[in-house]
Amino acid sequence: QKEVEQDPGPLSVPEGAIVSLNCTYSNSAFQYFMWYRQYSRKGPELLMYTYSSGNKEDGRFTAQVDKSSKYISLFIRDSQPSDSATYLCAMNTNAGGTSYGKLTFGQGTILTVHP
Amino acid sequence: NAGVTQTPKFQVLKTGQSMTLQCAQDMNHNSMYWYRQDPGMGLRLIYYSASEGTTDKGEVPNGYNVSRLNKREFSLRLESAAPSQTSVYFCASSETAAGNTIYFGEGSWLTVV
């Protein structure tokens, strides 16, 4: 079983829809949770970063972490065609030392927002 | 401000050939990383360098070597390329070894035939 599971999709929605992207994980030591967006033929870019449980909002994007269920989500409101990309969740422990910086990624969800 | 720059962007190798992927960052970051990305596998860490002068193995280090040349540069070497190393390679950096805000380069597409 992979440490981080993410539905690869693809997910296709109409413009203006609310999008929900999700990841589950098995390692209870994960403390830091990130969402990356990756356009075709480009490197991943950091979208959201949260620590421990709770919600964080940035414009049309909301990241949600539920550590008790080992479940994280990214919500995109009023989705736009420019949001079409692959979305990757990533996680990190707070173990210190050499564990820092060793992100564990989900497989990525391909999202298409059509006009 | 270029961020993280990788070269080459595309490369085709024959089995057994060697090559080095170059990476440089201009953000004065201490930590640097090499990841590979394969369909259905997500991004997997090959090697990382928490700070200048140190390197450590990641999840999939076999068949690779790295050199942290200075604070800016971190290279990845394939000594004897194999078809299983066909992948997209990403260099990344972060300000500290906490590494929770990692910035990626544009990627290097490598095909081994």
Image (spheres, coloured by chain):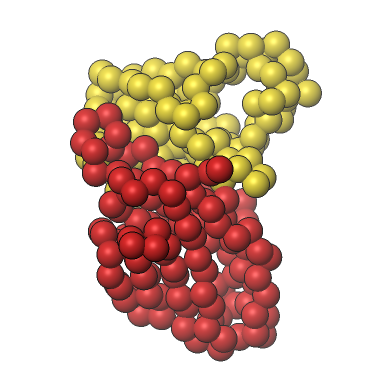
The x, y position of residue B96, in whole percent, is 22, 40
Looking at the image, which residue is at 28% across and 70% down? Answer: A54
The quadrant in which the C terminus of chain B is found is: top right
- Going by the picture, which residue comes out furthest to the right? B113
Chain B image colour: yellow
Q: Nearer the viewer, residue B105 or A101?
A: A101
Taking the image as drawn, is residue A26 in sight? yes
Q: Nearer the viewer, residue A5 or B88?
A: A5
Q: Toward which corner of the image does residue B58 lie, by quadrant?
A: top left
The x, y position of residue B111, in whole percent, is 71, 30
The x, y position of residue B53, in whole percent, is 26, 18
Decide: is A22 above or below B11.
below
Chain A image colour: red
Is B77 displayed left or right of A72 in the figure? right
Looking at the image, which residue is at 57% across and 51% down? Answer: A107
- Going by the picture, which residue comes out furthest to the front? A68
